[in-house]
Amino acid sequence: MANKVMKNSIILVIGNLLFRVGGYINRLLMSRMLGPEGYGLYGLTLPFQGVFQILSAGGLPPALSKYIAEYNTKNEKALIRQIIRTALKYMVFSAIILSIILLFSSDFIANSIFHKPAVVWPLRAVSLVTPFSVIVGAMRGAYQGVYKNEYTVYNRLAEQLSTITFACVFVYCGLYAMGAVLGTVTGFIVSAITSTYLYKRYISPLFYSEDDLDLSLREELKLLAMLIRFAVPVTITALSEMVIYDIGTIIIGIFMLSSDVGYYNSADPIARIPLIISLSISTVLLPATSEAYALKDQKLLQQYVVDCLRYCILTVLPLCVLISIYSEPIIALLFGSTYTPGAGVLSILVIGMSFYSIYMICSSILQGLDKGKLPMYVLLVGTVLNVVLNTVFVNMFGIIGAGIGTTITTAILMVTIIYIVIRQTNISIPWKNILMIIVCNVILMMVSLIIPKTILGAIIGFIIGIIIYCVLLICLRVLSLRDINFFVEYVNKIPQLRKYTERIVKFIENKNLIYKTE
């Protein structure tokens, strides 16, 4: 049963990877087509896209995922269909209202807050995104609730291809930063159409039954209230997450030039690469934890939580180490040498994102246990702290200050949330094993520092670093037999690699290089 979590996590890693890779390709193309100043103007619209999408969705996609998973185990198909209908009506209504608000407030935001009149029309274009994004969110929530995350992958692929294509066309036609935003609008229109088709074709039949709920308005509002009770903490948490992610962009936009925003936004998406892994794990962990909690299975809960934390740390930390060390050649390779002023902030910010990756996993655990208010309170405090630290450090150190402030905040969040999870779940964390993972990453860092910090050096460093890291995991007995069997199951799907994996597994077993799970 635990394999279901990791299998779906891998599917979501692929989906989020497509989303991130597509997003990075879009950003790379926009950065080169618009230049630092135009890319900075486009970057200033991104926080508003995120915030208004979160507000209009109202936290209901995770609520859909949770309650669909819960009621599906009880075979209450009619109730599931009603939950989806009720949530979707609320989300679309909210999206339309918020789009109107953003449309009429764009002038004030551009001129009175950022003092950059050129960002008015790009902000107005953002108001077109939210009505379509909420449809996409609802459909993906349904996919996750029944562990059909491959449809999220297909949907993301359609969205990214459309966004990239139309953004390039609009910018090429002379629409500048507004063209980049209109590309996103078009991407969400296509995504809304494809996600609805996939739901109708493949997910809706799973909820078919002879029964149908004929709810009165009062009963439907009561059902909506149940969803909102779960969704409000999730919404506040998501908004606070946006502040963690994007407050640097906003603070730099207020106090510095558009080109400085452009430099920071060349570092920011690269720093978020480790979040692909943690986001994928946490998205699947929410319904899985909810399922284990509903079954009152402490052993299953322990296995879910510990495995997900370990897999997150195993994969995220080495990625952060390598990105931090080779930040300058990475930015030069992806965005061009014009954007290398963002290398310093990338080295710091990616470490902060590794802390936040662990926070995301722990937050999802608490949400699955119906304790979503706890991570909300922690994150609210962290949000205030992050605003203060970013304001202070940006004025002191420029764009690097945004990385410093965010990293300090995320480190505090991580320590706090881990303590809360341990207290709330009564799980046992394998600290010795986690310490050995950290030791492997320290050695990886020391080796990587020797290699020249050029584009060629970065490529060589990543290849050698990954090999050394895998060898260290084996030699220091970090991997359990369950870890090895799980990964071998997927590697063996490539017939040419099967004979090599069998030899490696036999060697590990003969040398007794396996971590004994507690």
Image (spheres, helix red, strand yellow):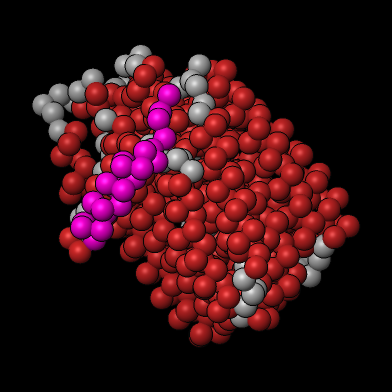
Q: Is residue 90 something that shows in the picture?
A: no
Depth order, front residue of 278/463: 463
Q: Is residue 216 something that shows in the picture?
A: yes
Q: Residue at x 48, y 71 (%)?
A: 25
Please report the bounds of the magenta region as a residue range: 497-518
Q: Split into 4 quadrants, where in the image is the C terminus? A: top left
**Above or below for 305 versus 241:** above
Q: Residue at x 47, y 79 (%)?
A: 168
Q: Is residue 309 left or right of residue 190?
A: right
Q: Is residue 492 left or right of residue 236?
A: left
| Residue sitting at the far front | 511
Q: Split into 4 quadrants, where in the image is the N terminus? A: top left
Q: Is residue 393 left or right of residue 495?
A: right
| The stretch drawn in magenta includes residue 508 | yes
Q: Is residue 480 left or right of residue 52?
A: left
Residue 8 point in image, percent of width and height: 31, 43
The number of callouts visible is 0
Residue 223 point in image, percent of width and height: 38, 23
Depth order, front residue of 342/60: 342
| Residue sitting at the far top | 296
| Residue sitting at the far left | 210
Quarter of the figure with residue 124: bottom right
Residue 178 point in image, percent of width and height: 57, 72
Residue 201 point in image, percent of width and height: 17, 49
Q: Residue at x 45, y 47 (%)?
A: 475
Q: Residue at x 88, y 57 (%)?
A: 396
**Above or below for 265 versus 422:** below
**Above or below for 310 versus 74:** below
